[in-house]
């Protein structure tokens, strides 16, 4: 299988560059949009504009190609990125681990969710919530991962920390198990 990867900043520029980037990656890999099985996108939590852009692009691409959409929790993708960074095996398989995934929600708050990885699958341990940094209370030794440490590091509990992101590659590593669990749906119902 041919793989193509493009990394870039999100934010305001993403809405103008996302579709041309997808088209260029498909061309580079020699794949037509209709050859795909599913369109995967992050569903939040996150910024309103970023989530609307991701959903609209995923819906548009999927609708036009007759494909389903697989929405993936953004915090789960952060946990997967952290797990993969910490992985000890050659295929990125780490032993059981628990990760608090943390994203900056701005306005003095964080998005936080806790996930347990065991036997090759993720389970939600604590559902995503919007918290002030001081409200986070991970178990001792539990890994905290995300993008909040520069902004809120001193206000967070002590413990292991890792910079992690809800990257497209993390979303794609999660996709097979989520597809097998029936997570994909019609493009017009993607939220």
Image (spheres, rainbow, N blue to C red):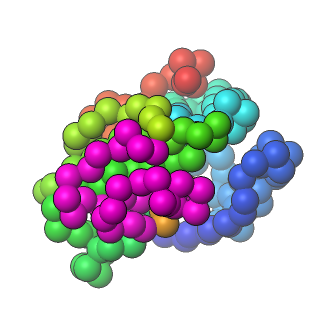
- Residue range (magenta): 133-162
Residue 147 % position (x, y): 54, 57
Front residue (pair 43, 32):
43
Front residue (pair 99, 157):
157
Q: Quadrant of residue 156?
A: bottom left
Residue 145 % position (x, y): 41, 59
Residue 127 % position (x, y): 32, 33
Residue 73 % position (x, y): 44, 39
Front residue (pair 71, 76):
76
| Quadrant of the frame with the C terminus | top right
Give the left or right position of residue 99, taking residue 156 as reference.
left
Which residue is at 82% across, 45% downward? 12
Which residue is at 32% across, 68% downward? 160
Which residue is at 54% across, 18% downward? 189
Eyeballing the image, is 61 above or below 20? above
Eyeballing the image, is 24 above or below 71? below
Residue at the far top: name it: 189
Eyeballing the image, is 77 above or below 82? above
User: Is 138 part of what is drawn in magenta?
Assistant: yes
Residue 78 in view of the camera: no
Q: Quadrant of residue 81?
A: bottom left
Front residue (pair 159, 123):
159
Residue 113 in view of the camera: yes
């Amino acid at each position: 299988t041919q793989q193509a990867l493009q990394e870039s900043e999100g934010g305001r520029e993403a809405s103008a560059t996302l579709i041309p980037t997808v088209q260029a990656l498909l061309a580079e890999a020699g794949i037509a949009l209709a050859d795909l099985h599913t369109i995967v996108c992050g569903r939040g939590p996150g910024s309103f504009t970023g989530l609307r852009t991701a959903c609209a692009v995923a819906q548009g691409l999927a609708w036009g190609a007759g494909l389903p959409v697989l929405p993936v929790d953004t915090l789960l993708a952060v946990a997967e990125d952290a797990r993969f960074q910490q992985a000890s095996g050659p295929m990125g398989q780490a032993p059981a681990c628990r990760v608090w995934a943390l994203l900056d929600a701005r306005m003095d708050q964080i998005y936080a969710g806790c996930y347990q990885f065991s036997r090759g699958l993720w389970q939600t341990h604590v559902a995503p919530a919007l918290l002030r940094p001081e409200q986070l209370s991970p178990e001792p030794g539990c890994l905290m991962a995300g993008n909040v440490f520069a902004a809120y590091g001193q206000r967070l509990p002590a413990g292991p920390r890792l910079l992690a992101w809800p990257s497209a590659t993390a979303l794609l590593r999660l996709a097979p198990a989520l597809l097998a669990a029936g997570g994909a749906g019609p493009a017009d119902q993607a939220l």
